[in-house]
Amino acid sequence: MLLAEANVPYEQLKDMEEINPDFPSTDVVLVVGANDVVNPAARHDQSSPIYGMPILDADKAKTVIVMKRGMNPGYAGIENELFFYPNNYMLFGHAKKSIEKLTEAIGPL
């Protein structure tokens, strides 16, 4: 889902360089449908087609929840190693419906 389609105001967006240092002290990261932009292989796997690509360091958070419809690869056509990290959980289904169900389960804050 593009952030513009989700009606996220531009003022609330952060540059990658600005947000990446925050991930190690973040309790939970919710990744919606992203693949390549959160794949840690970009940092260390020189044989990967995305090696050297700037990514969000979501894997450095305490817990990562990735919402996807399935395990299909991203644009680069490769598996995302984040999906197999011990701090990652997969929530399969339609993202909007899943978020609505999570919001209902949590209730008002």
Image (cartoon, rainbow, N blue to C red):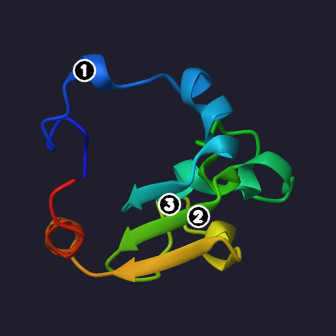
User: How far across and down, in percent of the image, does residue 98 sit?
Assistant: 22, 74
Q: Horizontal and vertical percent for residue 68?
A: 36, 73
Relative side of 98 to 77, left or right: left
Q: Which residue is mark 3?
A: 35
Location of residue 2 with respect to 95 vertically, above or below: above
What residue is disc 1 on? Answer: 10
Compared with residue 86, is residue 27 higher up or lower down, i.e. above or below? above
Q: Is residue 95 left or right of residue 49?
A: left
Mark 1: few, some, or many residues within 10 Å (few <14, many ≥20)? Answer: few
Which residue is at 57% across, 53% downward?
A: 38
Marks 2 and 1, Cα distance to the nearest angstrom? 26 Å
Does the image show residue 62? yes
What secondary structure is marked by label 1? Answer: helix
Q: Residues within 10 Å of mark 2 (few under 14, many from 20)?
A: some
Find the residue positioned furthest to the top.
11
Amino acid type, callout 1: Tyr
Upstream in the sequence, badge 2 or badge 1?
A: 1
Q: Position of residue 20 (x, y in %)?
A: 62, 33
Crowd band around label 3 with a 10 angstrom C-alpha radius: few (<14), some (14–19), many (20+): many
- The image shows residue 25, relative to residue 75, as above or below, that is above
- Residue at numbered disc 2: 63
Q: Give 36 or 21, whichever is nearer the viewer.
A: 21
- Mark 1 and mark 3 in contact? Answer it, CB < 8 Å: no
Q: Which secondary structure, mark 3?
A: loop
For marks 2 and 3, give the one nearer the viewer.
Answer: 2
Give the alpha-carbon distance from disc 1 to disc 3, as whole Å.
22 Å
Q: Nearer the viewer, mark 2 or mark 1?
A: 2
Q: Which label's residue is closer to the chain start, 1 or 3? A: 1
Q: Amino acid at mark 2?
A: Thr
Residue 59, how many percent across, how many down?
66, 56
